[in-house]
Amino acid sequence: MSKQYDKEKSKKNASRLKEIILTLRKYHLHRGFTPQKLYGILEDLGPTYVKIGQILSMRQDMLPKAYCDELTKLRSNVKPLDFQEICAVLEEEYDCSYKEKFAQIDEKPLGSASIAQVHSATLINGQQVVIKVQRPNIYETMSKDITILKRAISMVKMVSSIGNVMDLKAVIDEIWNTAKEEMDFLLEAEHMDCFAELNKGISYITCPEVYHDLTTKHVLVMERIHGIPVDNVDELKKLGYDMNEIGQKLAENFVKQILNDAFFHADPHPGNIWIKEGKIAWLDFGMMGKLTGRDKELFRSAVTAIVNNDIYQLKNVFLTLGTAKQPIDHALLYTDVDEMVSRYGNLELGNMNLGVVFQEFMQVANKHHILLPQSVTMLGRGVMTIEGVLRFCAPDINLLQILATHMSNEFLRSLDWNKELKRTGKGIYTILNKIAVIPAQLSDLIQMTVKGQTKVNLEISGSEAPLKRIDNMVNRIIAAVIIMALIIGSSLLCLTEIRPMVDDIPLLAMLGYILAGIIGGILVFFMLRKKKK
């Protein structure tokens, strides 16, 4: 029986393998491997390969930009399953008729994709929900296709030309890992719970509630969100929404997901962002990115390096963040990073496109065979997608500017101001103490020189005038240091909320500025007066 099963399995695999090879031959790979050919191959091979193409479109560190751009044209809409097949999956998962769980399920799907199909439904208690049902045997089908694809690659004579474009083994492994996560609906339910918990304190953010008692690995049941897609600008404006306000809040929340939560929506296209009763509703949590603490810090470092035109810092980010598949040509990498940094060096933050910067970052990584972590490439794709949404819905909102502001505010919030003020005060006190002894030390030095008690080869003709000039000079230095201390101290106080306050400025800080101005004015007055003499 086992041998018969293996025979049948081998026969099916051989048939599918033949189909793959014939498809590859159809596109005449010996004449070159183009983005259009890759698109055609994946589309012809069916739903599994459409999903492969969608995953590949996000990996600009694996594929050149032209290939990724072409693959973004692949659509996940495929021929819908018959409703009876959906019912069969539900009954297998629940071990009973679906009518015991749902009062009604719409037979017409809301959407049909390569992995799952979505239907609206009503629970027994009248609650409207959405059911996401996984296609029957999709895991087994995709697993088989991935295995066969690995074999097909080794058999295709033109593999060398493809291999020059991408790391085939890494591509296939990455595809399978990503697809397995998307096919686990219990994991998606966890993502939704985690997202809801991380954003529960934000009044304008929401996401569907999961019905855990009805959710399995192959069926996800969630609250139905009634709203308007964020790119339906005309409809939103008719209802009185301010698109700039929506764009600002959307960008701020996405930045928070990256920098604070290290857990972000990796597919933020307009269909997954709806506006519901004044709130931004995030949908579809099958593809979520997670950043390690190290990745998050390196992302901050990369942004800082670009803003500050720091070539060495950005080069180190490349070397630290990714895995080099070949020996690195450090001189060439430095040149490429230099070109990248100089391209943005003279631009204001408001004129810089973070998605384009990220895109170029991944292209440089690909050129130098540096494989970036999956989480980072997902972040890059997410950033490019959300910027596309912002450009369409709220073109005045700049993601990089919001990101830089968030990083700056985060840095200020992380400081212990009492500690910083004490440390600054101690530093100023130490400087003043050292400066205070300078006149006495200089006086002693001059007196000793006049008396011939030093071995300095100088001829002093009158010691009182030089001493007076030095005293005046030191007094000015002391006054300048005091002014500097007052300004620095007052500026630090402005970042606190020490009361009383005048126009949101602590009174103590205002007095410091006034005192610095008075001392500065007196100093300038005496300098000008002496100059006239």
Image: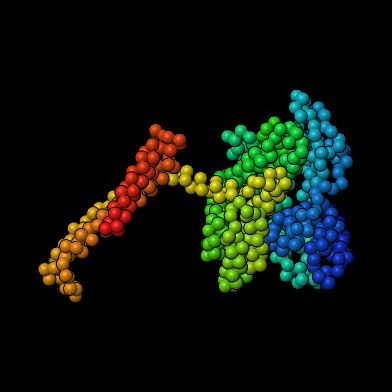
Q: Residue furthest front?
A: 532
Residue 263 location in percent, x, y?
Answer: 61, 46
Residue 516 location in percent, x, y?
Answer: 35, 46
Residue 80 location in percent, x, y?
Answer: 86, 44
Closest to the observer, 455 or 125: 455
In the image, taking residue 385 as reference, residue 91 lies left or right, namely right
Q: Residue at x 40, y 34 (%)?
A: 499
In the image, taking residue 273 as reference, residue 260 lies left or right, namely left
Q: Residue furthest left?
A: 451
Residue 369 location in percent, x, y?
Answer: 65, 67
Q: Residue at x 79, y 44 (%)?
A: 116
In the image, taking residue 238 as reference, residue 494 lies left or right, namely left
Q: Is residue 248 above or below residue 365?
A: above
Closest to the observer, 166 or 382: 382
Closest to the observer, 337 or 460: 460
Q: Residue at x 72, y 46 (%)?
A: 392
**How many tags in the picture?**
0
Q: Quadrant of the C terminus?
A: bottom left
In the image, taking residue 76 as reference, residue 358 lies left or right, namely left
Q: Residue at x 80, y 32 (%)?
A: 121
